[in-house]
Image: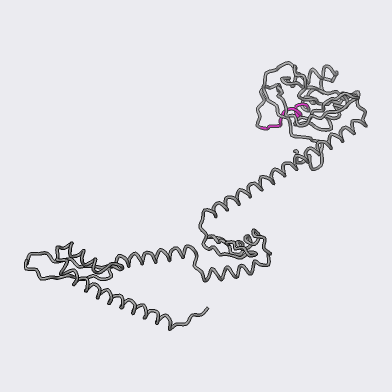
Amino acid sequence: ELTRWRGGVPRRFLSIAQAVNGAPPAAAAAKEPLFEIPVGLQDGRVVPLRLFEGDNLVRAVRQFAKEQNIPEDVIPALFEEVKKRVVPADPDAKPSGGDGDAALSTPEIIFDIPIDVDGDVHYLKLYRGDVLGDRVKAFAVEHKLTDALAQKMLEAVAERIRTSQESERAAEAKRAQQEQQQQEQERQEEQEEEKAKAQPLYEIPVDVNGAVFPLRLYEGDVLRAAVEAFVAQNGLDASTVPILIDEVAARISNKPSPQQQQQQQQQQQAAATAASLEPLVSLAVSLDNPNPDALPLPPIAMYAGESSQAVADAYCKANGLDVATIAPQLAQVLTERAEQKTQEQHAAAAGVTAAAGGGAVSQ
C-alpha cells in the first residue's frame, strides 16, 4: 500500500492496523488513544471516537453512541465501520466471541508530526491503517482549525510524508548500490587472490616507456581481455591493444610456457640421472685360478668421470687380487675401452647432426 500511496497520494495512507482478538477487557487507562476515528453527526459536527488499549470494541461503540445521542438503529452500521478500521480483515481468523468482542493492541506508529497551533505544539500521530484525510480532519476539529487551515495542514503533511518517503527510497537505493559495489569488489579480490595463488601459463615481458612489466596469462584467460586489462593497468593507449595481442600471440606460439619448460627440465634431469647410473665401461674379469671350486670374479665397471687406475685398484682390493700386478693391467684395458666408447658416442652425435642439417625449416 505504501507503493500505491507513493504513486499518487491516495486517500488510503497505510495498511490496516493490527489487533488481537479475544483479549480480556481492560479500562481505558492509556494516556494516548490507539485510534481516533472521526464520526460525522447529524448536526454537522465531527466528533472523534477514541479507542484505548484494552478497550472492548462493542462497549466502546455503544458508550460513544450513548454520549452523542446516536439512534439505536445506527449503532450496528457504526460498529461495522469502526471494526473495519481497527480489526484486520483476515478471512481465516476465528472470532473469540459471538457478540463481536475485540480487544485492541498497540498499532504501529508511522509518523509523529509536530503541528504548531497558536504557539502550542501538538502532535499529529499517523498509525498503520490511518486515513490521512480523516486523521487531519479530526485534528482540525479537535483544535478548532478553520477549513482553510485544515486544507493547508493536509497539503503540508502530505508533502512532508512524500519528502520523507523519497529520502527513504534514495537512502535504500544508495545502500543497495553500496552493497552491490562491495560484492563486486569482494568478487574481484577473490579472483585476484586465486590468480596470485595460481602459476601463470605464460609470463611475457613487455616494455612500457622504458620499463619492463610482465604480462601474465593464466589458465582460462581470454587473450584480448588480459591484454586490455594490462593496457589499462599500465596507462597505455588503447590503440596498442591489437599490437600487443599480435606480439603476445607470436611469442606464445614460439616460446614454451613455464610449465612446458619445467617439464623439459625434468625430462633432461631424468635423462642425465639415467645416464649417470649407466657405466661408461663394464668388463667381465677372468683369471686363471688353480682352485676349481673358487667363485667367478664379478665384472668391473667404470662410470663417467672416474679414474681407471683408481677403479682398478679398488676392484683388486675388494676381490683379493694382487694390486701391484693385476691393477695396472685392468686400468689399461679400462682406459682403452673408455676411449673407444667416447669415439663411438661422438660419431653417433655427428651423424645425428648431419641428418638434421639436411632438412629445411620454414616459418
Answer with left or right where residue 167 lies relative to residue 220: right
- Name the spot of residue 69 as percent of width and height, x first: 85, 18
Residue 246 is drawn in which quadrant? bottom right
Residue displayed at 64% across by 58% down: 233
Left or right of residue 298: residue 207 = right
Is 237 magenta? The answer is: no
The answer to whether residue 41 shows anywhere in this view is: no
Residue drawn at the location 42% of the way across and 80% of the way down: 356
* Left/right of residue 140 with respect to residue 84 in the rendered view: right
Q: How many marks?
A: 0
From the viewer's side, name the closer residue of 320 and 152: 320
The spot of residue 5 in percent (x, y) is 78, 39
Q: Which residue is at the far front?
A: 324
Left or right of 268 in this view: 205:
right
Reply above or below: 188 against 40: below
Is residue 107 placed above or below 256 in the rendered structure? above
**Which sits in the foreground, 122 or 180?**
180
For the N terminus, give its image quadrant. top right
x, y percent for residue 291:
6, 66
Which sits in the foreground, 187 or 298? 298
Q: Which residues make up the magenta segment?
A: 82-91
Using the rendered image of the protein, determine whether residue 247 is visible from the camera's viewpoint: yes
Residue 96: where, in percent of width, then height? Answer: 66, 23
Of residues 171 and 243, which is closer to you in this image?
243
Q: Quadrant of residue 110?
A: top right
Q: Quadrant of residue 103?
A: top right
Colouring style = one colour
Which residue is painted at 60% across and 52% down in the image? 188
